Amino acid sequence: MPPKITLKYLATELGLSVTTVSRALGGFEDVSVATRERVQAFANDVGYQPNQSARRLKTGRTSSVGYIMNGAQGDFRDQFNTRLLVALGQALHDAAPEHDLIVTTVPEDRDELETYKRFIDGGKVDSFVVARTCIQDPRVDFLLDSGVPFVTHGRTGRADEHDWVDINAADGFLRATRHLIQQGHHNILFLNFFSDLYTAVERETGYLQAMREASLAPSSRHCPHGYASAYQVAREVLASADAPTAFVCASDIFAYGVMEAVSESGRAPGRDIAIIGADNLPPLMYQQPSLSTLDISFETVSQALIELVLAPREGVPRHRCFDYELLLRDTTA
Amino acid sequence: MPPKITLKYLATELGLSVTTVSRALGGFEDVSVATRERVQAFANDVGYQPNQSARRLKTGRTSSVGYIMNGAQGDFRDQFNTRLLVALGQALHDAAPEHDLIVTTVPEDRDELETYKRFIDGGKVDSFVVARTCIQDPRVDFLLDSGVPFVTHGRTGRADEHDWVDINAADGFLRATRHLIQQGHHNILFLNFFSDLYTAVERETGYLQAMREASLAPSSRHCPHGYASAYQVAREVLASADAPTAFVCASDIFAYGVMEAVSESGRAPGRDIAIIGADNLPPLMYQQPSLSTLDISFETVSQALIELVLAPREGVPRHRCFDYELLLRDTTA
């Protein structure tokens, strides 16, 4: 094992006091320029890294961005957490290679605010990315009170008070629904999350607007997010006398559950029943009809989140909003 | 915002010096038992949390376990990382609620040892869980040199020098292959990871042993992990004159790719071609035949990893090995 490169080691090797070395590395002017340069050069040569616990106490900075994932893993096919995690990590490494994304999970039955508190009081991170925001979001209330910098992925009821990056879901679902109406569909069912996620409300707003514009009767169903629950809802409504001819789904996971129920009922997705999802997940299987969907790049969103979180704001809150792209494939052919 | 509960605040409220309060909380015997109890009780009442950066300097403990995820996200359906992450988080919260699992991602093109080094030098964690081990694993070499406690999920070429938790993959794949042989199959193809993962070698060892016992000619194919690559390999071998009648797959992801190629070739999975996977993932779709697979609980493995990592060893390395359960379903009916 190589010797541990400490301040004391530097001092011994350089023939200086530990205090002088420390103040030289800190750039203090009571150390001569020549000595400062000599100490810095030697420290670089031997690969000295200041003890970060000590540096943290002094500077209050950790070079870490926190991302606390809450909830159970739920349906494993819900890839939101994994995809956002990897994209955030990549964006942070690209923008600031010396920074780390510090992630932790909070089981469903625990209070995640305790974890935020421990991260803040423990000086573990400089700032947070907060995802899957709700209209009334206790994490946002807590972080606004604490004064710690943060950026949310998704708006909240207090959106004008904090930085956020979001997708214009109302506009995306408006366009998706309008497309189905233009194709001649009148009985269009919207399958949405059963939750108080801000984006769930936005999605439904877009659908409702398109239906209202066309003087059509809206019909929404809400269920827990997952393939299985979407499959059950679709089975039920397809067996009814007034079965819809098209489904707008809040996610691709929902849409794949609907697609299976449609096939099982003897109808062909696309030819008999139109389906549009959201997220542009990789297809589950090759033999299926390809799914029409609303697409937004996790990379784009993550880069915006990292850009904002690395430069805490000094003035008014900053907002970045991205548009979905409507990808039309087999299920709306 | 409530007042920040600092040592100084405690001292003022209690009418004691900061030094006395600090030493009382530290359990030092130069403070009387009565004062220690009084300080501790008051600190508890007001919810005092010691500044962890300061405590880290003193104790060298962070109450954090590190888990560094490397590589790109690859096939999103590869749920290993998400499942292990959530199960580790749950196991740690259950065993030591005041601890945090500190996770970070390292993009594929970066040296993950730099991240280990930064976590160690920065005092960010006390210990590591290292997953997806290779036979020659530079992370294990690095951590053994560094002296930082760690437990691997999976053995390595230096397995007798470090703590590990693993699954007895050789035995599992031996039993899976034997089952197919007992069903009358002679031409059994093994589809394995194209990698130097320790478990890939173990899996193949089990398959080869079963084939040798029965004096059958083994036939292995290796490809990058993913649904698409398994589908391609299976399409190719199913079109050959000497098409296998059974597939043993190193993962369920592989097995689902094989299942689609089998269906596409006009054969029925289970009736015409037998398939066994590993991991017991939730089914992709309901209408498919259910997949026979080797099952091990992520929760069981994670609890063992956390148990070992929370109690760094003092003597010889500790090892925990779990057995797969062979779940026989439609695809081996």
Image (cartoon, coloured by chain):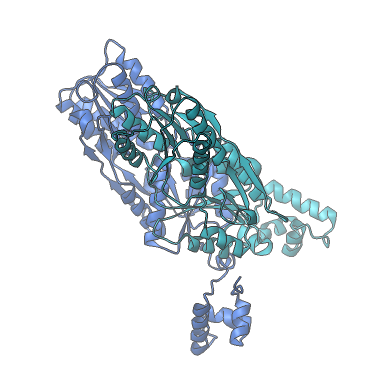
Chain colours: A blue, B cyan
Q: Quadrant of the N terminus of chain A?
A: bottom right
Give A286 or A70, whichever is nearer the viewer.
A286
Q: Looking at the image, can residue A150 be seen? A: yes
Give B204 or A311, whichever is nearer the viewer.
B204
User: On screen, A18 above or below A262?
Assistant: below
Q: What's the residue at 28%, 34% (across, down)?
A: B239
Q: Horizontal placement of A20 versus A158: left or right?
A: right
Q: Position of residue B166 (x, y in %)?
A: 58, 44
Q: Quadrant of the C terminus of chain A?
A: top left
* Count of marks placed on residues: 0
User: On screen, B65 above or below B284?
Assistant: below
Q: Residue furthest front?
A: B215
Q: Position of residue B150 (x, y in %)?
A: 61, 54
Q: Residue furthest top?
A: A241
Q: Position of residue A33 (x, y in %)?
A: 49, 88
Q: Horizontal placement of A263 versus A145: left or right?
A: left
Q: Looking at the image, can residue B97 be seen? A: no
User: On screen, B260 above or below B46?
Assistant: above
Q: Position of residue A125 (x, y in %)?
A: 51, 56
* Quadrant position of residue A181: top left
Give B94 or B233, whichever is nearer the viewer.
B233
User: On screen, B160 above or below A2?
Assistant: above
Q: Horizontal placement of B30 versus B182: left or right?
A: right
Q: Horizontal placement of A69 versus B64: left or right?
A: left
